[in-house]
Image (cartoon, rainbow, N blue to C red):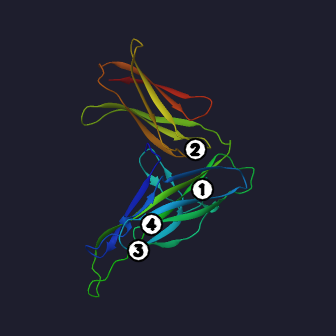
Amino acid sequence: MGQPRRLALVALFALLSHAPVAGAQISVVGSTVVEHDATAGERYESSILVRNTSDKPRAVRVYKSDYAFFADGTSRFDAPGELPRSNSAWVDPAVSTLTIPAGSDVAVTYTVRVPAADTLRGTYWSALMIEGEVTPPVVNGARQIGLGAVIRYAVQVATHLQATGSRTVALSNQRLVTDSSGTRALEVDVRNSGERAYRPSLWVELYDASGTQRAKVQQQRGLLYPGSSLRQRFVFGDLTPGNYKAVVFVDTGADEVVAAQYRLVF
């Protein structure tokens, strides 16, 4: 999830055995996170470039969904408008279906109309789903049952209300983990508890019992929405067994950097 987050979702279902999978030949070109700084009452347009790499025309569906992700690895694609900060009602794609010629790119345009309300603060977002449709062909007049896949790209449409919204963070569930190779790491869950999305810069400084710094690990993460969370893993090199102090820092772009201190025993 260090990104921007790029989501290509695979759905399995019954279709003709051994048939080419049409959906797998449809892709979104470029980033699947589209951000825009806007003001209340503003109207703006953008587009998603969709590519057909096959030698046949391919049908594509375009529809809206809410989207959230969490530190335990789960993602939610709720019905549009269900999440408190959904902007799906603002987003109006120009088409719901289209056919892309063989070997071609087509721009799917959409309009975002921000409500003229002075109560809006921070970031509002949803996803436009780009789905390549699979139509099972008929062999000798009969359908056969097999397993196929549809590829769905979730293009995140984020609207940031200019210069508004708090950037706060909550850290929880810190734990020391060891993988099968014996590598040790500190894991901590990072949740955006504010009103505005940000790309957190995270680092940890590790000190031994004498106060000497033994490690510093840093990572930049992808866009973290309000209410969403991620799991950050800081991997340490070889360390002498003993007691250590880990100080975790999170820079959200706010005036102050958040820090939390943990005691670790290796």
Q: Quadrant of the N terminus?
A: top left
Q: Which mark is residue 170?
A: none
The residue labelled by disc 2 is 197
Mark 1 Cα shell of 10 Å, populated few (<14), some (14-19), many (≥20): many
Image coordinates of residue 261 in percent, x first then y, are 48, 24
Please name the amino acid that badge 3 sits on: Pro
Distance, label 4 to label 2, CA atoms, is 26 Å
Mark closer to the observer (1, 4): 4
Q: Residue at x 44, y 27 (%)?
A: 204
> At numbered mark 2, what does the secondary structure look like: helix, strand or loop?
loop
The residue labelled by disc 3 is 57
Image coordinates of residue 199 in percent, x first then y, are 52, 40
> At numbered mark 3, what does the secondary structure look like: helix, strand or loop?
loop
Q: Residue 7 is drawn in which quadrant?
A: bottom left
Ranked by sequence position, the earlier of labels 4 and 2 is 4
Mark 3 Cα shell of 10 Å, populated few (<14), some (14-19), many (≥20): some
Q: Which mark is residue 86?
A: 1
Distance, label 2 to label 1, CA atoms, is 13 Å
Distance, label 1 to label 4, CA atoms, is 21 Å
Q: Residue at x 37, y 74 (%)?
A: 56
Please name the amino acid that badge 4 sits on: Glu
Residue sticking out furthest to the front: 103
The residue labelled by disc 4 is 131
